[in-house]
Image (cartoon, rainbow, N blue to C red):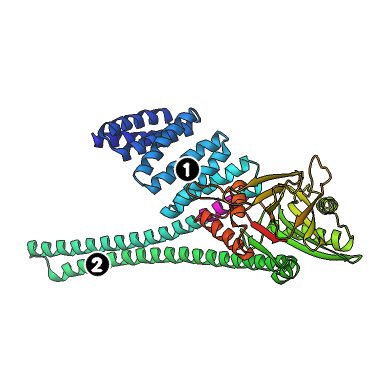
Amino acid sequence: MAAVGGLYNNIGLMHEYAKEYDSAIYFFEKSYQIADSLGSERSVAIANENIGLMYYHKKENLDEGLTRLKVSLDLWRKNQDIFGQCQTLVYMILIYNEQKKYQQALDSSFRSLEMAVNAGANDVRQQVLEQISIAYKGLGKHEKALEYYIKFDALRDSLSSQNTLAEIDRLAITHEFESKQIQDSLSLALQHEKEQVAVQRDIEAGKFWNKLLLGGLIVLGLLAILVFYFARHQKKTASIIAQTNLQLKSKNKEIIDSINYAKRIQNAILPTALKIKNSLQNSFVFYRPKDIVAGDFYWLSEIDSSGKKTLFFAVADCTGHGVPGAMVSVICSTALNKNVNELGITDPGKILNKVTDLVIETFEQNDNELKDGMDISLIAIEQIQKNEVQILYSGANNGLWIVSDRAHIYDKASTITNPGTSRFLHEVKATKQPVGRFSKRIPFETHRLLLKSNELIYLFTDGFADQFGGLKNKKFKYSSLKKLLLSSSGQGIDDQREALKKKFDAWKGSMEQVDDVCIVGIRL
């Protein structure tokens, strides 16, 4: 019966190849019924997987297709078949994207991608990368879509090169096999001639050996032609591959060198660790770019006006990451410097209003309408008296968190507490708009807070909270980040940074980092 089930499955595959999907489903169902009656979980999983894929090809009954694929996925998991899981997930992702369920497609994609990497299934990894690009495009995240399409295209080219090398090996093996066939044929011919000598003793020895020599020369001549042909073909193919690889290496080196130089430029706009420690002795910076250069940056400036010192600090997340994000970060950092150090604006809300004008003006110089900008938390710190500090804060989408022993510090702050500690985390929310072009632009609000010595303030971007990981491959989320900061707030400032680093690495695991990460903590 198992052989009959396998036969039905093969007939279904033939109908699939002919794009006769209804007929294919009929024979896959037959195969499933036999496998189910025999209790063969692997065959049941294969049949359900094939049926689910047929519904995708038909673009009908997609929910039924997902149901079949989930049955298959559960069986692969039960049998700990990694390759089966990641391939079935790919088919589910195809249906999610077809149904425009792009977030579900992304969740399944990252699980499948990790399993494909672990299983060494590069062809599956190629399919997943393409589907991630499609899902991000569907969500309107075009930079993400482009990033994963580039990864898909690079892997596709890599696999194509590997296939070319495999074809060269196949030709060499074919050449060796055919050479052996010719040698075997020559041996058989010699043996036959020897038998003929025994049978036809009356043939003159001289004539026999002349004919045999002529036949041998003909065979050797054909063999030489074949060897020459295959050797020339192999040499030509190898030359093409070598030349292509050389060009790729050269281009890759040029790109990496350019990006490394861009990193030097970006590092020049970041305040040094020494400068931060001189201005904010009890502080830490946890900075983890996704790529060589980043869209996240932090900024510091100190001014002395009429004998009163004001220290400005900001953490910003520019549009995108990598080289595009780094370019925007340079523009935004320059705009901050101009407003504070040249124009002398000290109110954070007014600074962000003016920076928005400068960013829009910069991008309007091009005929193409660009909507790049940044999310930012900006604070101004003023010492009022020995144990009291005034904080002026304004934010674009990025809030300000304060950890204190006080249950109330500001009327506009929302507060949570950790049952395991006596500390409270107060959140001052940002203005819900970016620095840059926005359809319903309003003035940025400035918040004034009086804080005490030893209280903590945190500025951050969304990279840590948005990182996928953990046992279920979910986002870390802001609620978990608040609990983490509350639980570690009693530690020294350097220990807090180390706690963030360990938690981020443990949560991410083998998953890819999804965005730049920047968190700054300051103890007053």
Name the residue type under label 2: Gly
- Residue 16 in percent (x, y) is at 41, 35
Would you say 54 lies left or right of 520 here?
Answer: left
Where does the N terminus fall, quadrant-wise? Answer: top left
Q: What SS does tag 2 mark?
A: helix
237 within the magenta span: no
- CA distance for labels 1 and 2: 57 Å
Q: What's the residue at 50%, 43% (across, down)?
A: 108
Q: Is residue 290 above or below residue 94?
A: below
Q: Is residue 331 visible?
A: no
- Residue 192 in percent (x, y) is at 15, 61
148 within the magenta span: yes
Q: Is residue 285 visible?
A: yes
- Residue 353 in percent (x, y) is at 84, 50
Name the residue type under label 1: Val
Could you say which is closer to the camera, residue 286 or residue 190?
286
Could you say which is closer to the camera, residue 211 or residue 268?
268
Where does the C terminus fall, quadrant-wise? Answer: bottom right
Q: Which residues are magenta?
A: 145-156
User: Between tags 1 and 2, which lies in front?
Assistant: 1
What residue is disc 2 on?
216
The crowding category of the residue bearing disc 1, from other C-alpha atoms within 10 Å (few below 14, some 14 to 19, many at least 20), is: many
- Which numbered marker is on residue 90? 1
Would you say 399 lies left or right of 336 here?
Answer: left
- Provide the major secondary structure of the magenta segment: helix
Could you say which is closer to the camera, residue 199 or residue 423?
423
Point out the tag, 1 or 2, that comes first from the N-terminus: 1
Q: What SS does tag 1 mark?
A: helix
Q: What's the residue at 28%, 65% (across, down)?
A: 218
Assess whether mark 2 and mark 1 are in contact (beta carbons under 8 angstroms). Answer: no
- Residue 2 in percent (x, y) is at 25, 36
